[in-house]
Image (cartoon, helix red, strand yellow):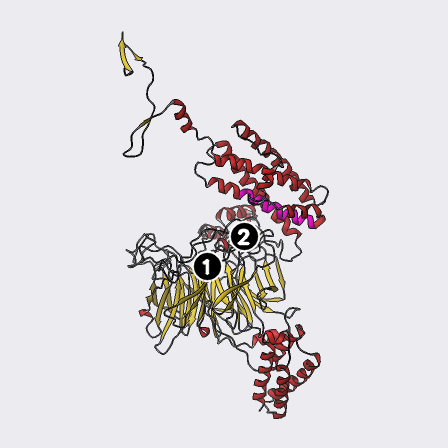
Amino acid sequence: MSVIRSLVAIAGFTTVAAFADPPIVQPGAPGETTRTLSADEATEIADTSYTPDDVRFMQGMIPHHEQALEMARLVAERTNNADVVDIAGRIESSQGDEIEFINGWLSDRGEASPESGGHHSMHMHHQMAGMASPEQMAALAEASGTNFDRLFLELMITHHEGALTMVEDLLEQPGAAYDPVLFEFTNDINNDQTSEIERMNGMLVALSTDPRAGLGAGITDAETAISNLKLVVTLQRPDGFFDPANPGDLPLARLAAKNEAEPTGDPEDSSDEEEEKAKKKKDPRTPLLSFANTDMAFRENVLVTGSYHGFNVYEISNAQPELMASIVCPGGQGDVSIVGDLLIMSVEQTRGRLDCGLEGIAEDVSDARFRGLRIFDISDLTRPIQVGAVQTCRGSHTHSVVSGPGRDGKIIVYNSGTSVVRDTEELAGCYDETPGDDRTALFRIDVIEIPVDNPGESRIIDSPAVFADPDSGVLAGLWRGGDHGDETQRTRKTDQCHDITVFPTANIAAGACSGNGIIFDISNPRKPKRIDAVVDEGFAYWHSATFNNDGTKVVFTDEWGGGSRPRCRAHDPLDWGADAIYDIVDGKLEYRSHYKMPGPQMDTENCVAHNGSIVPVPGRDLFVQAWYQGGLSVMDFTDSAEPVEIAFFDRGPIDEESLVLGGYWSTYWYDGLIYGSEIVRGLDVFELLPSEHLTENEINAAKLANQGAIFNPQQQLPVTWPAEPVVARAYIDQLQRADALPAALAQRLELQLARVETALSNDSKDSGLAKLLKRTAREIDALEGDGRQDGRQEALSSTLREIAYRLN
């Protein structure tokens, strides 16, 4: 008999007639029947207070904390550094309390706690993020004094970061940390250990003997450190290219706090005129890179610095650049190249307008929006005219001038777009990544043709899918994204190139393409062909590439965090946010080493590898490189397996409390000087100085290098050196440094070169001296040793023969 509930009216009152065993049901999926549950089953289903992932997290956190306590208890007998003693005391107190809390949480839920120091704990040593190995713990126990302090801080920072990783991994699991008590605990771990990491990094920086460590902050008055360089001049960003109310591009909250803290003077002393100026003064705008300096290009005695706001033109006949014109044309990123009287500029942001307007664009689809390559006529450098515009599906983040103008009067440019694909209603033919649709704008580069005589007819002539699998044709034929295993970086999938550096004389290009480093055959510039691709477990985002002067090596850079985060802290891995150096052997990339700027930076300084160029010292491979707020570093990678730093410059952070995006966007050698484009502070010019790493002869020889009176960031042209005595002396210095040239022969050579200088300065001929030089060249050819293996002896003898030819 079925039992139901019914309402019964008795004397004006309504009562409920109760019947036993009402059903508890669970509907199935569409098309499935409903099933009946028992009360116990229903309760079990509703119990979501914690998950197995929660339990594993809490059980794992006990041995993780126990190791931190073990490290902290070593402190008292091994150092008297008050800061280290204090941080160890904090760790003992907080993590001891947390272990007690975790045990209680597990016990309250009937879950087991791991045995302290037992098999489970030892097993977790090799499974949990941040745990120190037994060898590292033994080394810590053996250390003392400053060595102990440094190792303790390095291991403890890694340990804390491991705890943050464990929290991150837990929160990624479905249903995890639903328990509000556990969720609050994970928040406490995030807040407390992040704060302690920042504090310990500051302590670790303070232990460094590198002069770049702990520099004071400031926009124009930051402390500096310099080695083997001379800062010739600094120019601030021109008027119209910064916000006067916020010249340091500080976050608005931080700017307001600083303004409140600064004394404003006696209000009674202010004039009516000053009060009127104050009323008219605009409120500061949110920076958002609106005025950030970006990349540079050079032609003859002209320097153009790109910007998110447009570009600036400088005359650089001497070491003091003079501003010729400022061109306002917002749209970012603003990278520039120069070909003759044409300037090419990359535009990627959705606010960019075809008419260079300042008002931006709010609509989702607009005919006024511009994203792609702008082309300017700069025959009058003070009044450039926009003469061409090539719209692209993903805008233009960077571009590379590949060839031209050739006999047909056309320039070929590779375009790299990294932003979102625009709506096909705005630009026909633009398609996003729809499964099975090979028309997607991803996984491609654009090949653009620019007719010099009619730039308005510039157009995309091809968009090759350079990442496709050559056999199957699948577009996503390279790295699919993700990490490479435990303790490796997460890497973007390869659906774009950030930079493609071309080396036209060698018919080769190197692409830094998000998840891969790639080399291309560009013997047909209109049809680039991929010939090799590599991955790197330490790289998060392959950003840029630079060849050495003979095209046999490539320096790739990793722009970890998009360049906006600190990755040069004292505890950061040396292969994260760094360079990777590869030799090119038989058309294949062969890994040799990583290089990272060694000066420790603070949490307030964004620092990863960024743009640079070779320094053309004959016989050596030198690279001057921007590291954002890590400053600039000059690296010698002549031995690609053992790169070393030979010069540097660094400033303190822009702000002492907040991380403000700043520092060097790019540093390039041009016509004997190094130019640095500083995102917030402006433009710097440097000169290399002689040191134990670099002789005056080598520097002077570099100043004579012929760069073709042109430099574009992603177009590499081989430099050459004239047959001059100082070039020969540069090779002599290098051979003597390597003990590859007998001292007596070097002395005779110096006497001969002194005679050469006299003859050349008088514009006279000397056949006898020419014969002597040729004989000396034959002696050098007969030498054995390292100088022959690296080609310096051959280069020296060849230079002597060329000088002899001039004397005949």
Assign a secondary structure to mark 1: strand
Q: State yes or no: residue 151 in magenta.
A: yes
Q: How many marks?
A: 2
The C terminus lies in which quarter of the figure?
A: bottom right
Residue 110 drawn above or below residue 461: above
Callout 2 amino acid: Pro
- Left or right of 737 in this view: 479: left
Residue 649 x %, y %: 59, 62
Callout 1 amino acid: Asn
Crowd tier of the residue under label 1, counting other residues whose Cα lies within 10 Å: few below 14, some 14–19, many 20 or above: many
**Chief secondary structure of the magenta span?**
helix
Residue 181 x %, y %: 51, 31
Residue 682 drawn above or below residue 790: above
- Left or right of 713 in this view: 15: left
C-alpha distance separating marks 2 and 1: 23 Å
Do labels 2 and 1 touch, CB within 8 Å? no
Q: Which residue is mark 1?
A: 516
The residue at 34%/23% (across/down) is 24
The magenta stretch spans which residues? 147-164
Residue 381 is at least partly visible in this image: no
Camera-side mark, 2 or 1: 1
Residue 195 drawn above or below residue 364: above
Q: State yes or no: residue 412 in magenta.
A: no
Residue 731 x %, y %: 62, 77
- Left or right of 149 in this view: 719: left
Residue 120 is at least partly visible in this image: yes
| The quarter of the displayed image where residue 420 is located | bottom left
The residue at 42%/69% (across/down) is 521
Residue 789 x %, y %: 60, 74
Give the number of the disc on residue 566. 2
